[in-house]
Amino acid sequence: MAGELKLQTPSRRLVLISNRLPISLSRANGKWQITSSSGGLVTAMGPVLRNRGGMWIGWPGTVDSPGMGRLMDAQQEKFGFSLAPVMLTQEEQENFYFGFSNKIIWPLFHGLQSLCDYNPAYWTAYEVVNLKFAHSILENSSSDDYIWIHDYHLMSSAKYLRGLGMKSPIGFFLHIPFPPPDIFHKLPWRTQILEGLLEFDLLGFQTSRHKRNFMHAVRTMLPELRPVGKGQISRIPLGGREVRVGHFPIGIDYKSFSINAASPEVEHQVIGLHDAFPGCTKILGVDRLDYTKGLPYKLDGFRNALQNYPELRRKVTLIQVVVPSREDIPEYHALKAEIERLVGQINGQFADPGWLPIHYTFRSLKRDELLAYYRACEVALVTPLEDGMNLVAKEYCACSEPDGGVLILSEFAGAAAQLRGSAIIVNPYDLEGVAAAINEACMMDASSRSSRMRKLQRVIKDQDIFWWVDSFLQAGISSELEDYPMLLQARQGQVDDSWWWESV
Ligand code: GDG
């Protein structure tokens, strides 16, 4: 079967590169365990690459490698694209991934510079690993492929690819925010990062705000450059070539979410959820365990709602799902303890026999279960302190009944740029404002709910993940996803893609 897939491999492929592969491997008692990698990048990009015979290059989440090749071959049959693992040593994992990526770039780019640890060893490892990725990309691709590199872990990779002689166009998309210059300037390696980014041919950001921040950094740090264009795409001429810079708000596979959310399997669970919280408006929060998601503020905002609007007591339940993430980083342990302390405190303060204000879950949900939560909950409370886009907000709307839910959304989520007309927009730091928004959402009449949700769904449906890929490829190489057609066996229905959705 792996052989058949290889035979059908198209001459022109999308080669997608991210720090993590869509699957993570670990070994227990000598046996490989395969789990899906969590997070927005994987959910978003899976449907794009699925069954098109392309390739995904990334780290499989383990330092162990015997037998890896066979495992990768087996997975590619299920996905309809190949997987190429980039192996990292334990030290690289520590310094590149947990260090530079997650203790410097992640907090800094989300505007939380006090959480940064500018250890120089982290930078050295970042460069070593970016070079390692460049070698792997070169080994696994041909000049006909489109090389599309994703996210903040790999901002130096184009510099090394150029050094190794790669001439073909290379696109880059940053899934997280790009910060304003006064924050970016704190980075000791700001010049190297900026110059590295300018080695790509197309740079994509989630919103015009993030793009503007980047252009501002270019203007202040490299005043000799003369960027042109003010619209969606700007150009930076660089002696003999140019870098295009655009904003491309990432979308979701709307159709898949809305169809699956209405399936009998999900509907069964939706009924179960309505029965479990009788007479209560269910307010949903689904967040990875991460300080950027603003969970303590959200809980305090909910506490304020119960304090300021006593009529909400016994009438609302906050269902807060926290998805485990980056558990090896000490700050995340402290955050979990803080969340659990607040949940305990709020439940202790307000619970009555038969009513618990917060229903808290700390685990990853299966996809059907997640869709059931989206569909069953009358309100979604999405209040990150800063977020590139936030797919949970879009997925919630796609799964909601047309006359269904109300979305409360942080003004600092990238999604707010597209959804601000019909979501209730809040400043997540404004605890009184969040409380008022919760009250407004719970009290909203059916006709406002329905007209707002229909408008939200229209935008999310029109600007879905395929629209996003097309706009990026158009800007990058005047091409579209259709130019990378489905594999023959997928068109004939021979590739089973349900596994993908069960796993992400
Ligand atoms: C980064 C940027 C940007 C969540 N819980 C479960 C689960 N999920 C899935 C959701 C969603 C994804 O994880 C989370 O995506 P977000 O966009 O909210 O956040 P990040 O992971 O931080 O993603 C972000 C994104 O990249 C894409 O560009 O929007 O701003 O930070 O898709 O569905 N999936 C399952 N069980 C869960 O419990 N199966």
Image (cartoon, rainbow, N blue to C red):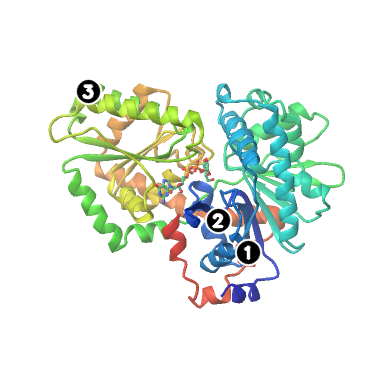
**Image quadrant where residue 219 sits:** top right
Q: Are marks 3 and 1 in contact (CB under 8 Å)?
A: no
Which residue corresponds to the image point at 65% horizontal and 71% vertical from the top-left? 9
Q: Nearer the viewer, mark 2 or mark 3?
A: 3
- Name the amino acid type tagged 2: Trp
Q: Is mark 2 within 8 Å of ligand 1?
A: no
In the rendered image of this protein, does residue 254 appear above or below residue 358?
A: below
In the picture, the disc for residue 349 is 3
User: Circle 2 sits on which residue?
Assistant: 467
Give the mark nearest the N terminus, 3 or 1: 1
- Residue beneath the point at 56% across and 30% down: 107
Amino acid under disc 1: Gly
Residue 54 got which mark?
Answer: 1
The Cα atoms of the two marked residues, 1 and 2, are separated by 19 Å
How far apart, in angstroms, are the residues tagged by discs 3 and 1?
54 Å
Q: Is residue 463 above or below residue 390?
A: below
